[in-house]
Amino acid sequence: MTDPVTVHVPLGARAYDVRIGRGLLADAGAQVAPLLSRPRVAIVTDANVAALHLAPLRAALRAAGIESEALTLPAGEGTKSWPHLTACVDWLLDRQVERRDVVLALGGGVIGDLVGLAAAILRRGVRFVQMPTTLLAQVDSSVGGKTGINSSHGKNLIGAFHQPALVLADIDLLDSLSERDFRAGYGEVVKYGLLGDADFFAWLERHGPALRDDPTLRQHAVAHSVAMKAGIVTRDETEQGERALLNLGHTFGHALEAATGYGDRLLHGEGVAIGCALAFDLSARMGLCAQEEPGRVLEHLRAMGMPARLSEIPGDLPDDAGLIALMGQDKKVVDGRLRFVLARAIGDAFVSDAVQGPVLEQVLRDAR
Ligand SMILES: NC(=O)c1ccc[n+]([C@@H]2O[C@H](COP(=O)([O-])OP(=O)(O)OC[C@H]3O[C@@H](n4cnc5c(N)ncnc54)[C@H](O)[C@@H]3O)[C@@H](O)[C@H]2O)c1
Ligand SMILES: O=C(O)C(=O)C[C@@H](O)[C@H](O)[C@H](O)COP(=O)(O)O
Ligand SMILES: [Zn+2]
């Protein structure tokens, strides 16, 4: 193990560390032991991750004298749903997981969001540790305490804020990630530059293509993203204001995920990338940012092999009215009015309720 970078999330009684580095899975026993009142943990993971990383994790825990049991759920966005939440909670109760025990979420954002919600409602709240195994989960979903499942009405509509007790992001685990899942996770990385850090965006323009193969660059990208998110979450834990900036691209992205059935047609991070491109297009058309900014965003997404237009989503999509209706379930809606994260420039985003129907329709039409 090399020395991990630690980002502290100072949330008073809910404070925790995010450790980012190589070899953390092999060190999981020592990392988790201080949290345990008895030497056992319940692990929840998905089938793909179980095949690759569950046995080494259990062996590492065993070597530190920690017993574990594991529940393996199907992989994919469809798992963030009532039947799997019920199965997860029932399994934890069946294993007599107690209030003082710790549940370990080993997987991507799907497992982290689902297990976090299960931990939030189990016996009215047990602690959980996030062991994120995707780029997306390491830079975003494992930090900040948003947990939840999807509904046919929309994305993440059933959930709770429940902060993890610890996050262990072993960047070596990303070696086994598919190209497509790595790229989807990159959608959330680039989001941080776009919403609040122009220098980081410029760094990504230079180094983005090398992140997959260079562990030093990868660690920097994860740690920088986590530090940005930790800062925002610390200032606004429950999204009363600033935290909504982390939703850049998501008003479009979540509607597209709902429209495509939460499946393989469109991954969350791909929806975010397309949504960021559309948010910059919308901002430029409203005269809020320079006309060059959307072009620069598009060029970088293209260089990274990311989708950026609606026409790149396979299959049919609802018409403009249908997509706008899906946006109506967005959690940022106030008094029935849509609110979007828009931008004055790359690195300078803000929330606006001033988007008019015709310009929104024009943006959607031109992206098809
Ligand atoms: N709570 C939050 O703040 C937050 C933030 C961003 C996204 N999310 C949510 O996260 C979800 C998307 O997360 P995701 O992109 O990680 O998807 P995911 O969890 O479905 O993982 C993507 C795929 O990679 C596989 N996988 C995971 N780790 C692997 C590894 N190390 N090697 C090989 N395969 C591996 C998984 O089995 C899955 O097939 C969405 O539901 C999204 O809404 C939540
Ligand atoms: O942590 C946040 O806050 C975010 O908005 C991060 C997003 O990347 C993430 O997809 C989140 O789950 C979206 O939040 P939602 O409240 O719109 O469901
Ligand atoms: Zn997201």
Image (cartoon, grey):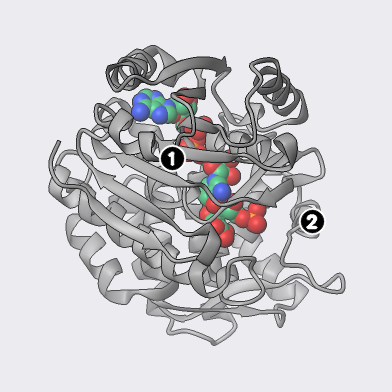
Near-viewer residue (327 or 51): 51
Circle 1 crowding by C-alpha within 10 Å: few under 14, some 14–19, many from 20:
some
Instruction: Provide residue 142's location: percent of width, then percent of height.
Output: 47, 46
Residue found at x 80% / y 60%: 328
Residue placed under numbered mark 1 in the picture = 35
* Residue farthest toward the bottom in the current orientation of the protein: 287
Residue found at x 71% / y 28%: 85
Kind of residue indicated by mark 2: Gln
Residue found at x 21% / y 48%: 4
Against 366, is 143 above or below?
above
Q: Say left or right for 165 vs 146.
A: left
Pointer 1 or 2: first along the chain: 1
Residue placed under numbered mark 2 in the picture = 329
Q: Which quarter of the figure has residue 151?
A: top right
Circle 2 crowding by C-alpha within 10 Å: few under 14, some 14–19, many from 20:
some
Q: Say left or right for 93 vs 229.
A: right
Near-viewer residue (288 or 119): 119
Of badges 1 and 2, nearer the viewer stands: 1
Q: Mark 1 to mark 2: distance in Å?
A: 38 Å
